Image (cartoon, rainbow, N blue to C red):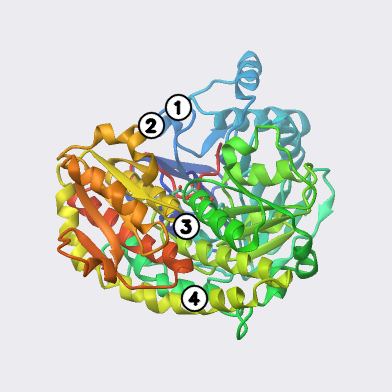
């Protein structure tokens, strides 16, 4: 998705802008550009299609230096990837960059065309540039013109603006797309993601919905949607110490898979007592009100949705609370029946996913008891807007395919299940068992990672495959779904997951000697049922690849079975995720795809 970086200082800021864009590359984009205010008080714009490296190349032939500037990576929505559509867009001495979608761009475009403005791109962003210019002609004040334009926009935006008539002032605004202000020493920065600015600061002011701001080297004024001056406190960024490079690993995804024992240990730090969980971490009044919860609704997208599906099995079987799980893009547009005392849980790695955030905002008027965000980014919109928060501590996840964010979400959800049990005074033995199982996870995941060589060999079998099936039962059905999603997103192999019992109701027709069938087969109460389903596949010549526990492996000759450590059933969904992540990673290597930045995808989906 698009990325924004901006800076104002008393030095050349072009290197800061470029490093910021490089740090946002993982989010996916197709073109990039900068606009810098030169010493001659003129905006110099340089744009290029392709990677940030191509923009750097363009800047070598056309150097742009100055003490204030804005920069952008674009992920095409309106208009194909092309230099003319790349940001910044300019009009009458101003330049802007924009994330989000302006929904009323067509009406504004025809009005501005009638006024004589010429359009050079197909973007909705150029409309905003001309709109601000039109208002500036009337008011002669950049701030007034910016405000007037913002009031006319429908849709989502994070915007940054520079104007030649005010060469020492940077403007920005947010509505529906994230934007933070970085605070330096007599310098200010802005970005759509704090990660872009960790090169220069770890102190941020987080803009709220509808805010707009004016930045100078040593000043920062912020106004809310009613143009009232507001204070947004400076906050220290939590993950500032974490490394953002790949280290010894070939890809971020592999690094992040191997970081899981540490990420899980970090997520559990400070959350567990001897035989109980420390519920006070949820937020001020959460501990007492958790006992009032009678129903749970979970809303999320993609991998985070799969984490919610696993949690439903835990919550319903252990706590006995009805739990409904739904993708955010459906939930936000339908009539939802909310019984009394329902807790809404949103799950998101980034905390900026447009559909999940919109679902949380929609839920505010639906009569929920409370809203809880499970999230990996402390300062994200989702965390700031929910009543309660449960942070995962996976550290920055750069690979588009979510790995350590997913397993830490599962850990948070099992912790929450345990908290719900505990506050009801129910099943202290189950509480203690969950706590001990959670504690064992980092070690167990470490063991599972040693399976990599065996999984690498299995991956070669997918070299000429175009389809695959994934099977699981109970809480391992969503794990099979997650395995299928991982495989399709990074290897481009079409993969579908089925609850194994559904096989004979249709998908069995697909099974022949060309169809790999990956099954998740831990030693649980459903194992015998699953074995019968696998026999149905074997009888039709399907290529079975099974992830099972050690005792099954010893149960006769199973050449295509990979054995995992025997663990408490409650944590096996977390454990069985690991080999599926490794499988999709190694299949992607065999297929030669761009593992960390798969085609057409973006890391943080901030538009609908
Ligand atoms: C996971 O591999 C995906 N890239 C994607 O499904 C992701 O989980 C989804 O877009 C939700 O993101 P979030 O957790 O940041 O909200």
**In the image, residue 267 lies at what x, y percent?**
54, 72
Quick one: SS at disc 1?
loop
Residue pictured at 44% horizontal, 75% vertical: 441
What residue is pinned by disc 3? 20
Observer able to see residue 457: yes
Which mark sits nearer the N-terminus, 3 or 4?
Answer: 3
Quick one: SS at disc 2?
loop
Q: Residue 437, labelled with which disc?
A: 4
Q: Nearer the viewer, residue 466 or 214?
A: 466
Q: Does residue 105 appear to the left or right of 79 in the view shown?
A: right
Q: Nearer the viewer, residue 473 or 391?
A: 473
For residue 242, above or below residue 382 = below
What residue is pinned by disc 2? 82
Which mark sits nearer the N-terminus, 1 or 4?
Answer: 1
Q: Does residue 170 appear to the left or right of 139 in the view shown?
A: left
Dot 1: within a 10 Å radius of its alpha carbon, few (fewer than 14), some, or many (20 or more) residues? few
**In the image, residue 508 lies at what x, y percent?**
28, 36
Which mark sits nearer the N-terminus, 2 or 3?
Answer: 3
**C-alpha gap between disc 2 and disc 3:** 21 Å
Dot 2: within a 10 Å radius of its alpha carbon, few (fewer than 14), some, or many (20 or more) residues? some
Quick one: SS at disc 3?
helix
Q: Residue furthest bottom?
A: 274
């Amino acid at each position: 998705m698009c990325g924004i970086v901006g800076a104002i200082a008393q030095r050349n800021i072009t290197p800061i802008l470029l490093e910021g864009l490089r740090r946002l590359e993982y989010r996916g984009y197709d073109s990039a550009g900068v606009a810098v205010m030169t010493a001659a008080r003129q905006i110099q714009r340089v744009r290029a299609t392709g990677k940030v490296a191509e923009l750097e190349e363009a800047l070598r032939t056309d150097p742009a230096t100055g003490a204030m500037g804005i920069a952008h990576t674009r992920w095409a929505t309106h208009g194909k990837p092309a230099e003319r559509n790349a940001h910044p867009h300019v009009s009458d001495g101003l330049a802007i960059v924009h994330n989000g979608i302006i929904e009323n761009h067509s009406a504004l475009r025809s009005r501005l065309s009638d006024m004589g403005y010429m359009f050079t791109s197909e973007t909705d962003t150029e409309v905003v540039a001309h709109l601000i210019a039109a208002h500036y002609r009337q008011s002669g004040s950049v701030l007034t013109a910016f405000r007037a334009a913002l009031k006319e926009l429908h849709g989502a935006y994070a915007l940054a603006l520079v104007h030649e008539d005010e060469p020492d002032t940077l403007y920005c605004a947010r509505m529906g797309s994230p934007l933070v202000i970085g605070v330096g020493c007599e310098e200010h920065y802005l970005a759509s993601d704090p990660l872009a600015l960790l090169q220069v600061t770890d102190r941020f002011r987080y803009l709220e919905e509808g805010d707009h701001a004016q930045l100078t080297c040593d000043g920062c004024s912020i106004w809310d949607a009613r143009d009232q001056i507001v204070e947004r406190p400076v906050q220290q960024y939590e993950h500032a110490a974490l490394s953002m490079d790949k280290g010894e690993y070939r890809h971020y995804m592999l690094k992040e898979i191997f970081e899981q024992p540490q990420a899980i240990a970090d997520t559990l730090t400070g959350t567990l007592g001897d035989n109980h969980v420390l519920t006070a971490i949820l937020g001020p009044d959460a501990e007492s009100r958790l006992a009032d919860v009678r129903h749970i609704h979970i809303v999320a997208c993609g991998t985070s949705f799969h984490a919610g599906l696993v949690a439903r099995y835990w919550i319903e079987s252990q706590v006995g609370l009805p739990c409904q799980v739904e993708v955010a893009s459906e939930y936000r547009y339908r009539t939802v029946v909310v019984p009394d005392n329902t807790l809404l849980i949103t799950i998101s790695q980034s905390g900026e996913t447009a559909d999940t955030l919109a679902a949380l905002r929609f839920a505010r008027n639906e009569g929920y008891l409370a809203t809880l965000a499970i999230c990996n980014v402390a300062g994200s919109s989702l965390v700031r807007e929910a009543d309660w928060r449960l942070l995962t501590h996976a550290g920055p996840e750069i690979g588009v395919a979510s790995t350590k964010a997913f397993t830490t979400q599962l850990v948070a959800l099992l912790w929450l299940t345990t908290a719900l049990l505990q506050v009801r005074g129910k099943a202290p033995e189950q509480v203690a068992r969950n706590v001990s199982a959670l504690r064992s996870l980092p070690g167990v995941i470490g063991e599972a990672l040693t399976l990599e060589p065996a999984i690498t060999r299995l991956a070669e079998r997918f070299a000429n495959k175009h389809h695959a099936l994934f099977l699981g039962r109970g809480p391992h059905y969503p794990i099979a779904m997650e395995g299928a999603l991982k495989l399709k997103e990074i290897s481009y192999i079409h993969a579908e997951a089925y609850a194994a019992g559904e096989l004979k109701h249709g998908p069995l027709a697909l099974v022949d000697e060309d169809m790999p069938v990956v099954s998740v087969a831990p030693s649980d109460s459903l194992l015998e049922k699953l074995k019968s389903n696998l026999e149905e596949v074997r009888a039709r010549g399907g290529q079975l690849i099974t992830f099972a526990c050690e005792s099954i492996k010893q149960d006769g000759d199973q050449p295509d079975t990979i054995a995992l450590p025997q663990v408490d059933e409650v944590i096996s969904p977390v454990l069985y995720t690991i080999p599926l992540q490794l499988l999709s990673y190694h299949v992607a290597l065999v297929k030669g795809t761009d593992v960390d930045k798969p085609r057409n995808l973006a890391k943080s989906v901030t538009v609908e």
